[in-house]
Image (spheres, grey):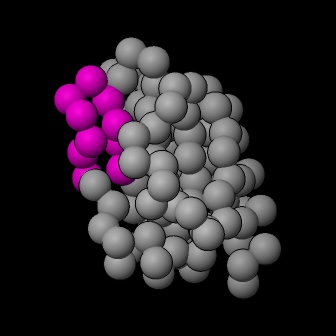
Amino acid sequence: MKIVAVTSCPSGVAHTYMSAESLELSAKKMGVTIKVETQGSSGIENKLTVKEIEEADCVIITNDVEIRESQRFKGKKVVKMSVSEIIKKSDTLIKKLQTMFE
C-alpha cells in the first residue's frame, strides 16, 4: 500500500512537522509506504511528485488551514483530518486504510 500526505497548520511550524512525523512512524510500524509533504512557514518541503500522487492508493490531508496546490489530488481517494487528530490517531487511521485498500 502506498500513501501520500500533506500536513499544514496555521502557524506552519510545530504541528505541521509533528503530524508528518506521526504519520511516518505509524506507516513504518505497519509496513506501509508513505511520503509526507509539509506546507509550513518555510513553504512546501518534500514536495510530492505527479508520479507519487498517481501511484498512491490514498491521499491524507491533515490541515487546519487551506493547503496549496490541492487540485493535484483531484480524482484520488482523499482522507482529511485535523492536525491534532492525526497526531493522536495516526495508527488508527493507517490501520483503517490498510483494511480498505488491501
Residues in magenta? 37-46
Q: Name the dominant secondary structure of the magenta segment.
A: strand
Nearer to me, 54 or 81:
54
Q: Where residue 74 sits: x, y (%)?
A: 56, 63
Q: Where residue 95 sits: x, y (%)?
A: 72, 63
| The magenta stretch spans residue 34 | no
| The magenta stretch spans residue 38 | yes
User: Residue 72 occupies which quadrant of the picture?
Assistant: bottom left
Q: Where residue 29 sits: x, y (%)?
A: 54, 62
Residue at x 72% of width, y 78% of height: 101
Quick check: 24 above or below 28?
above
Nearer to me, 100 or 49:
49
Does residue 71 appear in the picture of this structure? yes
Quick check: 46 above or below 54?
above
- For the N terminus, which image quadrant? bottom right
Please indicate whether residue 14 sits to the left or right of residue 45 in the image.
Answer: right
Please indicate whether residue 33 sits to the left or right of residue 94 in the image.
Answer: left
Residue at x 48% of width, y 49% of height: 70
- For the C terminus, which image quadrant? bottom right
Nearer to me, 51 or 17:
51
Does residue 20 appear in the picture of this structure? no
Quick check: 77 above or below 40?
below
Residue at x 50% of width, y 43% of height: 22
Please indicate whether residue 9 sits to the left or right of residue 38 in the image.
Answer: right
Q: Where residue 57 sits: x, y (%)?
A: 59, 75
